[in-house]
Amino acid sequence: GPEIFRPDAKEYSQKQLALCKKYGFIGLHPIDNNVNLRTSSLKTAVKIYRGDVSQVRESDIVVANCNSFRGALMDDGTAYELGYGNALSKPSYGYVSGAETYIERVTKRYPCHILKGAGTYADKDGYLLVDDFGTRINLMMQCGMVVNGGRLVIGGFECCLRTVRYDLDNGTLKLRHRWL
């Protein structure tokens, strides 16, 4: 998730990895890719990309922060990693801090108006907001989680890990390769 952009990202990642261990998981964190972020170049960007997708491939489960980041929707990079994991049929779990629906969050954070006669919202650029399916995030993200055996959790990172552990322990989540 976007925690990688925190000023204390290294320290925060250590807390997240400790929580993974607490729940019996071996965490892989993007910060572990040891890329020098002070070097701004396409070469550095490619190293980051390769490291991140490699970690998704190596993972048994993908956990993603799906909260809004720099706008109404989740971080683009996190969405890519989550989608990549879903394309690989990996179980994925996401977490959001609030119970508001996708439509509620977008209309609150992004200029929208009710389109007369259509009964729906249009955004400031004229596009209809039609993702009103009761999902908390974009339907492709949330449905990808559900179809692959995971789910979206309302709560924080630790709550999400607790849910993954619970689902594994009670047999709701079954892994192809039981490493945990």
Image (cartoon, grey):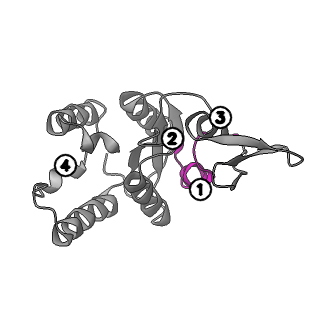
Precedes in sequence: disc 1 or disc 3:
3
Quadrant in which residue 22 is drawn? top left
**For the magenta stretch, what is the residue range?**
134-151
Which residue position holds label 3? 104
Mark 3, other Cα within 10 Å: few <14 / some 14–19 / many ≥20: some
Is 50 covered by the magenta stretch? no
| Label whose residue precedes the other's in the sequence (2 or 3) | 3
Q: What residue is shown at x 36% (from left), y 52% (from top)? A: 178
Q: Are marks 4 and 3 in contact (CB under 8 Å)?
A: no
Disc ID at residue 41: none
Q: Position of residue 21 (x, y in %)?
A: 23, 35
Q: Amino acid at mark 2?
A: Gly
User: Which of the two labelled residues, at mark 2 and mark 1, occupies the earlier sequence position?
Assistant: 1
Q: Which residue is mark 1?
A: 140
In the image, what residue type sits under mark 3? Glu
Tell me, for residue 31, which label it has, or none. 4
Q: Amino acid at mark 1?
A: Met
Q: Nearer the viewer, residue 88 or 172?
A: 88
Q: Secondary structure at mark 3?
A: helix
Q: Residue at x 90, y 47 (%)?
A: 117
At a point 44% along the width and 40% down the height, the residue shown is 168
Q: Which residue is mark 2?
A: 171
Judging from the image, what secondary structure is the residue with disc 2 in?
Answer: loop
